[in-house]
Image: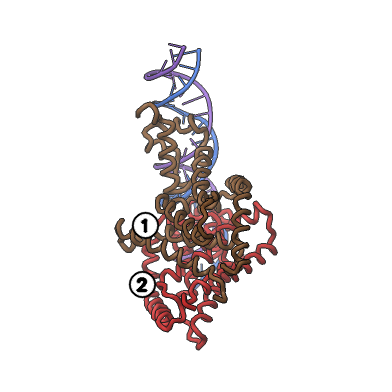
Chain colours: A brown, B red, C blue, D purple
DNA sequence: ATTATCTATAGATCTATAGATAATGC
DNA sequence: ATTATCTATAGATCTATAGATAATGC
């Protein structure tokens, strides 16, 4: 269309929408071309293979998914306050990108061989920040402010409870006829409950 | 092979393994036939369509997945003890059927239109037991034994934390080279942590 | 001259079915 | 006679590429 938003970008954009909706294998380069308004050969001209195109998109989404937990905030608020904010920020990100959990789960399991190098890469890149968070958490535990729990378990708990409602959304929308407003309301409630559950679950036992 | 274990069963069995591993769309009837040791036409002879064959398997797996939470145990143990046992039993089921979470998430999202009638069916079938559990939980809350939480949120929390590790297993196995024994150990630890997290998360606040 | 876009097509799938043949049950 | 199994194939994909043409930049 216009100069800056050229066909290459258009294809990338359309591919992203389709891959997020259906995953890698259910989207054909023909579908992408059709949506982008060009012919199918052009998709290959710009990205050579469907796999190439997908990798780019997947990597971006996966990085986005983990972003909240791969950045350190140096505010002077207490640990639990900052943790609460991180949980909420992660959930809010998912509200804006509802298909991300599906994309990651689906493609990581199906094409584990191909995607896993990427995961390891991201893992290595963020080791430092992970250790920092780990150190902070264990310190809080030692002080008796938080019950003993491994950093990995805590992060897994947060992520799992944050993502699950997005797996259920398609069902809620079609099967129980929730409209957009009801869904929005439900998501806010769920976010609140996840924060509540996590914060309650890490209270020290003797308290 | 032998008489009872006829080719129809053989096809069903092989289809199940393949669908669990790759989901609906990445398995062809040719793949199934090959694995079952017959030709591709026979798969259609017995099950007419690939969709038919899949539906049968999916329904069985989904029912199995929810089984623990759709049965009432009438032991006289306290509520929290019974809840703890249910969480563990659900996790143990997943240990024995590791691909179930993937199958459900993948297919419910991708083919929501087709699968959702099934979900509604199961939902209706188990309304009674759900209400019974709900009633019990709210009673415990009133007594002050459990912090206020909706039955649905509690169940969602349990299921989400139980399933997530099974999404991560392929990565752990290949990327970090965990062997079977290490995985088994890790799963036991995770089960323990989920129970701990849930039980801690429902402690009443003033306690 | 170079880059973007198109048409056409090869080659590899995949599902479903028609119609032939082999196995089984009475 | 009926049921199980096979071979062959129609018709619909899908990816990737070759080669032609249109658009753009100097």
Most foreground residue, B66 or B20: B66
Q: Earlier in the sequence, mark 2 or mark 1?
A: 1
Whether B100 is drawn above or below A32: the answer is below
Residue drawn at x 42%, y 50% as measured from the top left? A97
- The chain under label 1 reads B
In the rendered image, is residue B99 in sight?
no
Most foreground residue, A135 or C25: A135
Dot 1: what SS?
helix
Whether A82 is drawn above or below B149: the answer is above
Whether A49 is drawn above or below C16: the answer is above
How far is disc 2 from disc 1 in space, using C-alphas? Answer: 17 Å
Most foreground residue, A19 or B157: B157
Q: Residue furthest front?
A: A76
**Residue A19 horizontal/vertical position (percent):** 45, 45
Residue B124: assigned label: 2
**Residue A22 horizontal/vertical position (percent):** 43, 49
Determine which residue is flagged by label 1: B113
Residue drawn at x 44%, y 58% as measured from the top left? A167
């Amino acid at each position: 269309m216009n100069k800056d938003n050229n066909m290459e970008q258009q294809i990338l954009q359309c591919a992203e929408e389709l891959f997020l909706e259906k995953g890698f294998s259910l989207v054909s380069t023909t579908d992408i071309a059709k949506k982008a308004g060009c012919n199918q050969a052009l998709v290959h001209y710009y990205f050579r293979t469907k796999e190439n195109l997908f990798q780019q998109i997947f990597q971006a989404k996966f990085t986005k998914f983990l972003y909240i937990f791969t950045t350190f905030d140096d505010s002077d608020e207490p640990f639990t306050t900052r943790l609460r904010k991180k949980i909420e920020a992660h959930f809010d990100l998912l509200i804006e990108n509802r298909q991300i959990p599906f994309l990651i789960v689906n493609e990581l399991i199906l094409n584990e061989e191909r995607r896993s190098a990427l995961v390891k890469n991201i893992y290595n890149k963020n080791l430092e920040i992970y250790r920092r968070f780990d150190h902070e958490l264990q310190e809080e535990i030692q002080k008796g402010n938080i019950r003993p729990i491994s950093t990995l378990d805590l992060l897994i708990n947060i992520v799992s409870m944050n993502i699950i409602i997005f797996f259920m959304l398609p069902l809620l929308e079609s099967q129980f006829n929730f409209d957009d407003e009801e869904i929005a309301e439900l998501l806010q409630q769920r976010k609140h409950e996840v924060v509540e559950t996590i914060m309650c679950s890490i209270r020290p036992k003797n308290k």
